Image (tube, grey):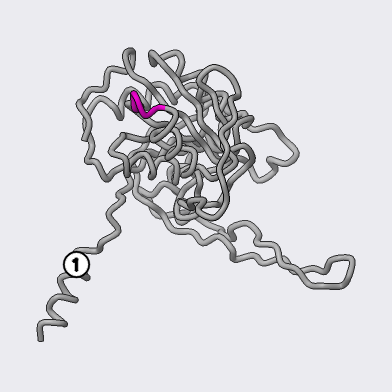
Amino acid sequence: MFDAPLNLKKSRILISNDDGINAPGLKKLEAIAKKIAKEVWVVAPETEQSATGHSLTLRSPLRIKKAGKNRYSVNGTPTDCVMLAINKLMKDHRPDLVLSGINRGSNVGEDMTYSGTIAAAMEATLFGIPAIAFSQEIDDDHVKTKVNWSSAEAYTAKIIKKVTSFAWPRDVLINVNFPPVPKTKVTGIEITREGRRKIGDEIIESSDPRGEPYFWIGAQQHSGSYPAGTDLAAIQNGAISVTPLSMDLTHPATMRKLVDAFNT
């Protein structure tokens, strides 16, 4: 738990992501952070690391490359980046807050278990540093149109100030998702719980030039609405979703039943 409210004007912020050091969302988050914090550092993957989850590189060397003042890239995962930033680059003065994103694409429902964006925030949380993950949902036709970052640009600073105005437990991180609408059409900010949708329902099968089969995991398949109060419903309704996530994966009710079962 950190001392709240966090004095952002005197704070040192670390930013990472999973889209890579040159990602537009990271640059936007960096610009926002520099307006509200005393010092901003960026340590991000050298290349895109989407869906790497909370993976750590153990069997190949990691290299840090300087990319500007207080900006570094790492040839590894988001977890590697945060670990190297805290234990190496910033070891003499650890960050007061870690921000991850802004990811190109939402991280809601089960997406969070695959997300490198969430993983960077998780790693900071394991170090006892408060962390917030930011993601921008994109339209289905995002390949043809540019990502509309306006809602993220308009609300990110406000959300950072709000969530750091009080202290949350050491094993909790905050997950924020912006809807794919312009800032003028945002319907509000909702405090939500994790929803449910399963990626991988669509498996695309084809053959390479040699006739060998290959498979491509497609997008989520879903129609209709999501349950009220979930991150998925908020985004679907044009609202910003703010979800507290716990690092403690223990399920107390089942644990009590297991104790009873093994004691009989």
Q: Can you identify the residue that label 1 sits on?
A: 253
Please name the residue shown 59% across and 30% down the image: 65
Q: Secondary structure at mark 1?
A: helix
Asked if 218 appears above or below 17 in the picture, the reply is below
Part of the protein shown in magenta: 90-94
Dividing the picture into quadrants, the one containing residue 221 is: bottom right
Q: In the image, residue 186 lies at what x, y percent? A: 48, 30
Q: In the image, residue 152 lies at what x, y percent? A: 50, 28
Report the front residue among 103 and 177: 103
Please name the residue shown 33% across and 13% down the image: 9
Task: Pick out the residue farthest to the right.
Answer: 209
| Chief SS of the magenta region | loop
Report the front residue among 93 and 262: 93
Please name the residue shown 44% across and 25% down the image: 156
Q: In the image, residue 148 lies at what x, y percent? A: 61, 30
At label 1, counting other C-alpha atoms closer than 10 Å, the crowd grade (few under 14, some 14-19, many 20 or more) is few
Q: Quadrant of the C terminus?
A: bottom left
